[in-house]
Image: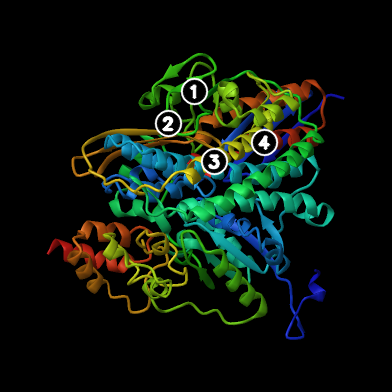
Amino acid sequence: MSARERTYLGVPVKKPRAAFFEFTSCEGCQLQLLNNEATLLDFLSLLTIVNFREAMTESSDDYDIAFVEGSISRDDEAEQLRVIRSRAKTLVAVGSCACFGGVNQLKNRFNDLAWVKEQVYGSHAIDTREAVPLSAIVPVDLSIYGCPIKKEEVEKVVTNLVLGKSIDYPRYPVCMECKDNHNVCLFNLGQPCLGPVTRAGCDAWCPSNRLGCWGCRGPAEAANVRQLRQIMHEHGFSDEQLLDRLECFGGFADYVTELKKAAKE
Amino acid sequence: MKVSCNIKVNHLSRVEGHGNIRIRIKNGELLEAGWDVVETPRFFEAILVGKLWENAPYLCGRICGICSIGHTLASIRAVENAFSMTPDRQTERLRLLLKHMETLQSHILHLYFLAAPDFLQLGSVLPLIESHPEVVQRATRLKLLANDACDIIGGRRLHPTRTVVGGFTMLPEKSQLAQLKSRLEAALPDLIKTAELFHTFALPDFVRETEFVSLLGKDHYPFIGGDLISSDGVVRAEDEYLQMTNEYMVDHSTSKWSRLSRQSLATGALARLNNNYALLQPKAREIAAGFSLQPVNHNPFMNNIAQLVECVHVVSDSIAILKELLAGKWQEPRQPVVPKAGRGVGAVEVPRGILYHAYEFDPAGRITRADCVIPTSQNNANIHYDIIELARQSAAQQKTDSEIQRLAEMLVRAYDPCISCSVH
């Protein structure tokens, strides 16, 4: 279907030019877009894709929306991101690495990049800096949370973006969606879970598969981590296990600092 | 007219991650050529230090967006080996089935979306949506089947949720497995059609002898654990993997490189097939014979065909696994885990070749040291020396610069490199 034919409530819908980029990441979120086999062709018809290096050779610097995956962990990446920002009307951070630094930011916890480099590369010189989210370098217009992103959510966000509708995220935690799915509580199955404090929107993806939540989508509004710590203790889990989950993707950075202080006391 | 050219491909497209090709030829003489990996490193081996064992599979799956299941399974195997755990038959079967479905998903993605456009003189698969809708529909049908299977068994196609040390957090419904079996049976004709499509493609005739490294199969074509073998006759135990990988650094790559008996080694579908041809399912061997693919084949472009052969193998083998699972009764999905101090190695054949995870633990089960050796990092030196030889031969054959560039790009894509993975 061509752009001219597509309308919404009788109003013609523009087909924005979209570009995809990736920095420090596993490139899995981009693959999630290709993983939408059933709805891929409909999804593609919403956009004119001008840049998607992982799937196509053609490329262009003229685009409206930039979808950016990955965290920033080298100076040349920061520079490229600034160029992308200057060209795009809308910059979308895609996935936990782009939104919070993701698993890459776990190297920052040592506060010793020299040791980190030595551990992996020995004496060989290698360029890196602390892994940070996109928003630490440039303004970000929209965030799509998750490790990995959920295709249904991407499709909703992109459709609303194309139609000019507002984009709303759930303010309640994953716990609500888990209850809605009639799951047995992971704590009652003897598993630690961040569901009570993590932003919903994934339909309790991991807990529905009997894996406790690791908080990849960051904190829900008014997340009560202090209360969660008590629940963890009551079920026999240590501060270390809570910390492992809270610090995994970078979304709970402020809470991690607080917990580390509290755990010492 | 003797060719002179200065080819620079920065951030090669239709591969995972960031790599550059360079070739300089003057008056038919090769001046220099090579493969540079410029991907930003992520330092997973440092990230793991100090973390409890249960973090390892969860974090390590995130090394790769394409083969997250393979990384998760290699990581689980390393932890279980360190804690002297052996998976029961049910877990072993389900893990292999999950592994097969990732192999199918990844190979189909590569064959149709990344490799095929080159043979059709296209920049991507997108124009085929209009011109050859049946081809795109077949590709998406196969990929969807494999991804749905990964959802059913692993909980999620990317970064799986149900795969844990000790087994699975939960099991699929038998009805889901029965449906999967019917869909797999229906997929075989689609794979035959895929073979017909690849028969219409002219694969470049290029040979550079190398050493192929893979797992060594005993009764079955190998995917999870076992001895290691090279086509030059080296055989080692799984936990002696360092003697197969011999990693070193070069200045033009952020990925480590590997070598064994020669300047470089190759791993992946072609290596597995070269070292374990007799163990392929009969239907898969038929496809291989149709392309005159026999061991030991030294044409790197044949890795595409080896992937196709493996698609047929994993679908046939998955049907057999499903028959066994459907005939039996479900056992407990998960064994308890008792951590202890020690070292564990897990070797798993992932789509792009043999993958190793190795961890050392303190008595509480905290990681004190971690090492991951990725298939693409083992292949990077082979890609580099292949590019040099391809450029030398092309210059001698007086090919045009655009033809040389096209061949070099196709050569790298034939390895289906996972560059982010190689710089984990």
Cα distance between the residues tagged 4 and 2: 23 Å
Q: Quadrant of residue B118?
A: top right
* Secondary element at tag 4: helix
* Secondary element at tag 3: helix
Residue B167 % position (x, y): 37, 46
Mark linked to residue B225: 2
- Chain holding disc 2: B
Question: Quick check: do tags 4 and 1 share a chain?
Answer: yes
Residue type for callout 2: Gly
Q: Sequence order check: which comes first, mark 1 or mark 3?
A: 3
Mark linked to residue B100: 3
Residue type for callout 3: His
Residue B14 % position (x, y): 66, 46
Q: Tell me the residue that label 1 is attached to.
A: B259
| Residue A111 seen | no
- Which of discs 4 and 1 lies nearer the camera? The answer is 4
Question: Quick check: do tags 1 and 3 share a chain?
Answer: yes
Considering every residue shown, the one lying at the far right of the view is B1
Give yes or no for contact between labels 4 and 1 (Cβ–Cβ under 8 Å): no
- Chain holding disc 3: B
Cα distance between the residues tagged 4 and 3: 13 Å
- Which of discs 4 and 3 lies nearer the camera? The answer is 3
Viewer-proximal residue among B354 and B170: B170
Q: Is residue B157 left or right of residue B170?
A: right
Q: Sequence order check: which comes first, mark 4 or mark 3?
A: 3
- Chain holding disc 4: B
- Which of discs 1 and 3 lies nearer the camera? The answer is 3
